[in-house]
């Protein structure tokens, strides 16, 4: 599957695009989920940061099965399914798909925002808060229709492997995301180019001072 944003870098911010990995901050999520029907023992997705309004892309061909706005949870969020996984895209600013839509890999389905319960600001849970809490919560759950732990959407029923488990059935999305090698090379070339520009500027300054 592709990343849900362009130019995704699978490293912790500021070197990369991630502010919170799967499995982090157990204290926060155990406390937050005390009154929920399913308790969560740690962060059950990855938090991806980019500027407000960044396009959110479908990582695979999938059917949109749920579109909601939950102010105390994922805010404006989307769920989609393909043959293997159910996907959650949380905290969006705007959603441009509806239940039942069939989207192709790379299609824009919404835009990044900070709606809902956002861990940011003066908290110990994010080392950095680059965009005032704006981020995408990207979660994945594995589908296994041979079991009985099922969720019913308007588009039909799916069964979630290891639900509820420690993370409401979620698995770590990070190893499943294929990072575009072309983008990685372009980023490296950009860094090299900027470094060369800085070196050239320093050489000019040194030359001018020596005159």
Image (cartoon, grey):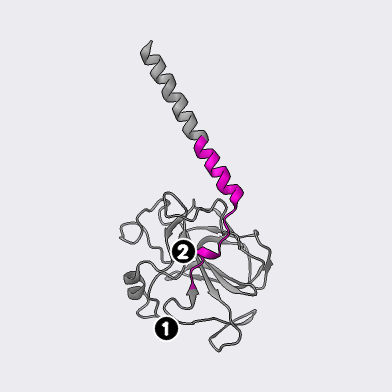
Residue positioned most to the top: 211
Residue 184 shown in magenta: yes
Where is residue 157? Give x, y as percent.
61, 83
Left or right? Give the position of 126 relative to 69.
left
Q: Nearer the viewer, mark 2 or mark 1?
A: 2
Q: Secondary structure at mark 1?
A: loop
Left or right? Give the position of 67 relative to 169.
right
Where is residue 88? Give x, y as percent.
53, 69
Q: Label 2: which residue?
A: 46
Compared to residue 209, the image places residue 186 above or below, namely below
Write the residue at 53% across / 39% down. Answer: 190
Which contiguous range is marked in magenta? 171-192
Compared to residue 183, the image places residue 67 above or below, namely below
Write the residue at 40% across / 20% down. Answer: 205
Q: Label 1: which residue?
A: 37
> Is residue 63 visible in this depiction of the protein?
yes
> Is residue 66 visible in this depiction of the protein?
no
Residue closest to the eye, 87 or 69: 87
Task: Identify the mark at residue 173; answer none if there is no mark.
Answer: none
């Amino acid at each position: 599957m592709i990343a849900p944003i362009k130019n995704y870098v699978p490293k912790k911010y500021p070197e990369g695009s991630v502010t919170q990995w799967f499995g982090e901050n157990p204290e926060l999520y155990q406390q937050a989920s005390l009154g929920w029907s399913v308790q969560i023992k740690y962060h059950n997705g990855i938090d991806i940061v980019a500027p407000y309004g960044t396009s959110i892309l479908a990582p695979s061909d999938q059917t949109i099965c749920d579109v909601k706005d939950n102010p105390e949870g994922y805010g404006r969020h989307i769920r989609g399914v393909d043959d293997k996984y159910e996907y959650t895209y949380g905290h969006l600013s705007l959603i441009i798909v509806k239940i039942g839509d069939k989207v192709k890999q790379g299609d824009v389905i919404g835009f990044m925002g900070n709606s809902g319960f956002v861990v940011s600001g003066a908290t110990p849970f994010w080392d950095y808060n680059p965009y005032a809490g704006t981020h995408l919560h990207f979660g994945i759950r594995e589908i296994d229709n041979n079991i009985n732990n099922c969720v019913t959407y308007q588009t039909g029923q799916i069964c979630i492997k290891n639900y509820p488990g420690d993370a409401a059935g979620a698995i770590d999305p990070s190893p499943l995301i294929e990072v575009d090698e072309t983008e990685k090379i372009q980023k490296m070339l950009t860094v090299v180019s900027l470094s060369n520009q800085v070196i050239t500027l320093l050489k000019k300054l040194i030359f001018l001072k020596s005159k």
